[in-house]
Image: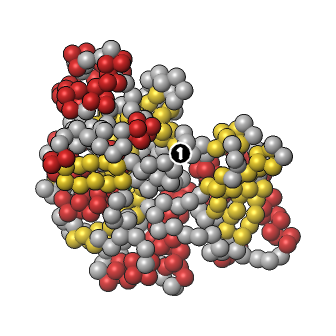
Amino acid sequence: MGPITREGEEDENKVGQYFQPEIECASREEIVAIQNKKLVEQVKHVWENVPYYRKKMEKKGVTPDDIKSIEDLHKLPFLSKKDLRDAYPYGLMGVPKSECVRIHSTSGTTGKRVVAFYTQGDIDLWEECCARAIVAAGGSKDDVCQVSYGFGLFTGGAGLNGGSHKVGCLTVPISSGNTERQIMFIQDLQATIICCTPSYAAYLGESMKEMGLGPDDIPLKAGIFGAEAWSEEMRRDIEKTLGIKAYDIYGLTELSGPGVSFECSEQTGMHINEDHFIAEIINPDTEEVLEDGQWGELVFTAIDKKAFPMMRYRTRDICRLSREKCSCGRTHVKMEKPRGRSDDMLIIRGVNVFPSQIETVLLEHGYQANYQIIVDRVNNTDTLDVHVEMTPEMFTDNVTDITKASNELVAGLKSMLGLKAKVTLVAPKSITRSEGKAVRVIDNRKI
Ligand code: DLL
């Protein structure tokens, strides 16, 4: 199905385009009715087919009869990453193996990887979510969409590739890496949309500059960037260097992959695909459900996915929800850019620090998002070292200039974090670039 406008919508090309208008612009009553019906069915499905979760429900004294609508959601037990590890690999599967057609898996560096399963139906719904994101970024069948997320076990490539097919874009499944070839294809095939991590988009921009190319030398108009936290400053940087509008997209392997939520032209948060996922925000310590607008841990219940039906899954992403009316016409709740993960949060000398706060300070001072945060413990005291690349324009070996510039950053970080950091300015290109998610933090503390 191609993009469709709501009846009476005049502008056929920009704002006002939706992949599935009847759902994306449904009234609150309609959305709640869909969620109520699907939740009741999903709880029955899980009770009957996932003994691991049934035991959790029994332990909490809940049966499917207790769940009559989304008002009862809070009665259900949570699932966490620990449950996924305990039930690895098949313990949370909701259908016979013979009905599953694919797996994807996280790139987790600690413990067992998460392995998620999909029926063909699960894949179709997932690809539709990604198609909604592409259309929201202005995509249609007239576009050439270059998918530069990694393919394979990672969900980024497969998800956006499937979405791009559903929209009918000419899809370029180039995967990540080989930056010169990426730029050559963008130019030769006249790619208009690119999908990759924001850090890779920034690297593409940097490589273009080195090749003497500017935004006018490439036909890109939009980018769909996600899989890691990125700041507003980084968005502006990428938009300027590539000459595009940069849209955020969010998701996680446990819930299919990219497309759980996506940004529209307003760029003020990501619409959650509420016909497939019910979102809650909880206090991560007390597990109490918080009101819309409050920061807390994002929890999702997948009400359609059959092979890997996640119920009240604790994402660890710190976020908040907003139900303010959106100018794009979509009615689904919006989540703000996640501030970081509760497990990304560093506690340094007792202070909570998110890498994104450090990034904001660096970008405000004219640096790019090429940095590494090194945390250690010396004589029982935490140390925070931030290695920051100078841009080629600011590169100097004049000690006075370097000291002045790093002192400014130390002051900026102090005012943002309330902590004294050591800043080391390093030469351009000396921090290793990533083709996927960037590695920003090295924590050497043995705690
Ligand atoms: O990163 C899925 C994805 C692929 C999303 C491509 C968007 C684009 P995982 O590897 O399982 O899945 O990692 C999921 O990445 O819990 C967040 O902490 C983080 N994350 C994903 N998207 C965003 C985003 C994919 N837009 C974990 N902003 C999630 C901030 C994000 N963090």
Between 176 and 145, the one lying in front of the other is: 176
Q: In the image, is the residue at mark 1 within 8 Å of ligand 1 by its beta carbon?
A: yes
Percent across and percent down for residue 296 are: 50, 32
In the rendered structure, the answer to whether residue 59 lies left or right of residue 40 reads: right
Percent across and percent down for residue 240 are: 50, 67
Which residue is at a point 19% across and 40% down the rendered structure image? 95
In the rendered structure, the answer to whether residue 101 lies left or right of residue 382 reads: left
Which residue is at a point 61% across and 50% down the rendered structure image? 355
Which residue is at a point 29% across and 60% down the rendered structure image? 158
Q: Is residue 38 above or below residue 230?
A: above
**Where's the C terminus, which quadrant?**
top right
Residue lying farthest to the right in this orientation: 400
Q: Is residue 175 above or below residue 319?
A: below
Which residue is at a point 62% across and 75% down the rendered structure image? 429
Between 292 and 329, the one lying in front of the other is: 292
Percent across and percent down for residue 375 are: 70, 52
Percent across and percent down for residue 138 are: 29, 59
Q: Residues within 10 Å of mark 1 (few under 14, many from 20)?
A: many
